[in-house]
Image (cartoon, rainbow, N blue to C red):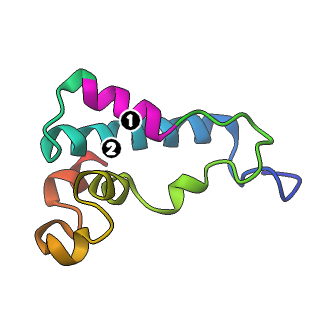
Amino acid sequence: MAGSEDETVWGEEEYVACLRDERRNFAWVMQRYGGLTSAEAEEAGLERYPYEPSGTPFRGLIFHDEAWHWAMLRIYGDRYTVDHPEVAHPSAEYEALG
């Protein structure tokens, strides 16, 4: 457990696992809905979820929304929930990724 306000509430191992999962999920959405190749999608995941060293202020703040949301913003823009209501919520396929 973190000892100061600048540290995350998770340990390094948990942070890295979360980072890996969100990168994977983001890449999956970018490939499935955004039309990127596997390599392009993986690179997009790495860019969207860079590693932040322990002690970085607000480390992991990106996790406040799930990868589905960040990918849809990139694919369809800020109004995706209005203009594309069919993707306003994660698909069952996405949810099954874990």
Q: Main secondary structure of the magenta part?
A: helix
Find the residue positioned furthest to the top: 39
Left or right of 9: which side holds 70? left
Distance of label 2 from label 1 (alpha carbons)? 6 Å
Q: Position of residue 92 (x, y in %)?
A: 15, 59
Q: Which residue is mark 2?
A: 26
Please state which amino acid type lies under the numbered disc 2. Phe
Q: Are marks 2 and 1 in contact (CB under 8 Å)?
A: yes
Q: Name which quarter of the figure residue 53 lies in.
A: top right
**In the image, which residues are magenta?**
40-49
Q: Position of residue 6 (x, y in %)?
A: 82, 53
Left or right of 6: which side holds 93? left
Identify the residue shown where x is 17% and y is 44%.
Answer: 34
Please state which amino acid type lies under the numbered disc 1. Gly
Label 2 neighbour load within 10 Å: few <14, some 14-19, many 20+: many
Q: Position of residue 35 (x, y in %)?
A: 13, 38
Find the residue positioned furthest to the bottom: 82
Q: Secondary structure at mark 2?
A: helix
Q: Which residue is mark 1?
A: 45
Q: Position of residue 86 (x, y in %)?
A: 11, 70
N-terminal of the pair, mark 2 or mark 1, is: 2
Identify the residue shown where x is 52% and y is 55%.
Answer: 63
Identify the residue shown where x is 29% and y is 61%.
Answer: 77
